[in-house]
Structure formats: C-alpha cells, structure tokens
C-alpha cells in the first residue's frame, strides 16, 4: 500500500484505518508466503539434486563399481566427485554462492537473485549428496520430518510473538561465531565427543535463529516496496530460513542418524 493510502486512512478516520491495516496485513501475508515458497522450492531442489547425484554416483553392480567402503560401490562419476580434488569444489561451492549473494544482492535484479538462490540450492544438493553415502534413507527421512516440525513451530513463534527477539538473536549470532571456530578446531582434533556436543549446540543456536530470522524478515516488509525490492527481500529471507533449516537438519541427523553398514 502506498504512502498516499496511509495518509488518507489517517484523515478518513478509524474505519479507513482498519481497512488500511487489513490491506497491510494481506500484503504482509503475501510477502511471507513468498519467502516460504522460495525456501520450499530451494529445499525441494536440494533434495532432488542430492538424490539424483547419489543415484549416479553409486551402483550395486560389482562389475561397474569401484569399492569405496565395506558395502559401497562408486561409479566412475562417484569416484571423480568424492575422491578427487573436485570434492573440495563441491564442498565450498555453496559458501561461494552465499558470499556472492550477500555482497551483490543490491546490484542484481530480482530475477537474478532468485536464479542465484536456486543455483545455490542445487550446489548445496550436490554437496549434501554425501549424506546418503553415510546414513540410511530412513534416518535421513526421520531427521527431515523432525526438522520440518520443529522449524514450523519455531518460525510460527517468530512470526506471531510480540516479544522483541533482537537481544536473543544477537546472542545467537555470537554463539554462531563461537560454533564456527569450535568446528574449525575440531577439524584438527577429530573428536567424536566434541562433535556430538557441537551438534547439540548447533541445534539450539539455529533453533533460536529460526525464530529471530522470521521476526526480522517480517519486519523487513514495507507496503510501499516496489516489485523488485519486495522480491529481493523475499529471496534474501528465504536464504536465511533455508540455512537455518539445513543446519538443524544436519545436526539432528548427526545426533540421531543410523549409519550405513
């Protein structure tokens, strides 16, 4: 709704004000629906790419596969993807997309922003295809549905609460920096117990960030935004919530998942 409409509603009295608020609420609902739709599309693309890559990388035919574990046979594509230096490109590509998106969001168009987000989701799917090598399909599905339920509740809380979650969000962001440093340290320590504790901490931190990010995304909405601005905000919000979801999912999978024999 435009600034003119808001000024007019003030002049025309309480009834018009209520009508204006209804229009704003409808606009906000549409905006948030766009955020969630973009996020869901990104998650679906990640899952499809991960599954597709896994099917191309793994075989059950001993004549076509290269042993890479007790019961794991990789195709030539799988060997190239997971055992050569290309694996580092696969691992770091999603991070490159996040940095590009963060620094270029104001310079690119709305359609380009959505394209970058979808490319990032696909790159994340390529990176996460290794999960299906390590964990059973049942474990992956269980972790996904638990994450979806928890995420839905946390995001709903962030959307509906009147409490200012800013202080909690700032605390969670500081905790996130500490978590990243601790994970880097554990790359050298390779401590299973330490990783277990970090996974618990990761679930707690990203759960808090989910509620805070949802509130922050909601507060980014302005009724006077044009299409380009509103769309880019929607995609940027979807990226934030997507990252929260993925991190909760991966941590829960580590904590509860059953590994393949």
Image (cartoon, helix red, strand yellow):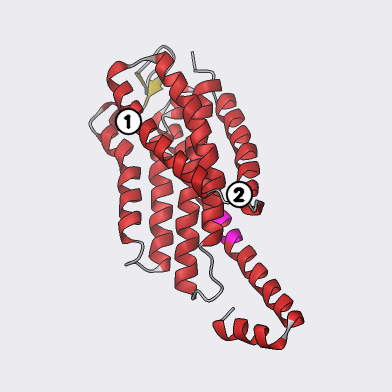
Magenta segment: does it hold 47? no
The x, y position of residue 213, in whole percent, is 51, 50
Quarter of the image for residue 76 reads top left
Proximity of marks 1 and 2: CB atoms separated by less than 8 Å: no
Q: Residue furthest left?
A: 85
Mark 1 falls on what kind of element? Answer: helix
Please report whichever mark, 1 or 2, sits nearer to the chain's N-terminal start.
2
How packed mark 1 is, by other alpha carbons closer than 10 Å (few <14, some 14-19, many 20 or more), is: few
State the image coordinates of residue 136 (x, y, percent, origin top left): 53, 22
Q: Which mark is residue 158?
A: 2
Cα–Cα gap, marks 1 and 2? 27 Å
Taking depth in this image into account, of 141 and 70 the one nearest to the observer is 141
* Residue beneath the point at 44% across and 24% down: 198
Q: Secondary structure of the magenta portion, mostly?
A: helix
Q: Residue at x 30, y 16 (%)?
A: 189
Q: Position of residue 240 (x, y in %)?
A: 46, 49
Looking at the image, residue 83 lies above or below residue 91: above
SS of the residue at dot 2? helix
* Residue range corresponding to the magenta coloring: 32-36
Which residue of the protein is positioned furthest toward the right in this rendering?
15
């Amino acid at each position: 709704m435009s600034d003119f409409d808001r000024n007019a509603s003030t002049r025309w009295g309480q009834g018009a004000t209520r009508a204006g608020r209804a229009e704003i609420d409808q606009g906000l609902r549409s905006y948030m629906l766009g955020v969630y739709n973009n996020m869901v599309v990104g998650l679906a693309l990640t899952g499809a790419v991960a599954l597709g890559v896994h099917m191309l990388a793994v075989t059950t035919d001993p004549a076509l596969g290269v042993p890479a574990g007790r019961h794991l046979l990789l195709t030539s594509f799988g060997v190239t993807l997971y055992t050569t230096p290309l694996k580092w490109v696969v691992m770091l590509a999603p991070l490159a997309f996040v940095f590009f998106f963060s620094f270029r969001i104001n310079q690119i168009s709305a359609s380009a922003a959505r394209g970058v987000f979808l490319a990032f989701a696909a790159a994340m799917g390529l990176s996460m295809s290794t999960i299906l090598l390590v964990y059973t399909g049942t474990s992956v599905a269980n972790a996904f549905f638990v994450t979806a339920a928890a995420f839905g509740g946390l995001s709903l809380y962030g959307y509906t609460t009147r409490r200012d979650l800013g202080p909690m969000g700032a605390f969670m962001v500081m905790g996130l920096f500490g978590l990243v440093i601790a994970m880097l340290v554990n790359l050298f320590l390779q401590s299973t117990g330490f990783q277990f504790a970090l996974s618990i901490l990761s679930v707690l931190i990203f759960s808090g960030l989910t509620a805070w990010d949802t509130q922050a995304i909601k507060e980014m909405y302005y009724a006077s935004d044009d299409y380009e601005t509103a769309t880019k905000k929607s995609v940027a919000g979807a990226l934030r919530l997507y990252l929260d979801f993925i991190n909760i999912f991966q941590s829960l999978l580590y904590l509860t998942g059953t590994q393949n024999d």
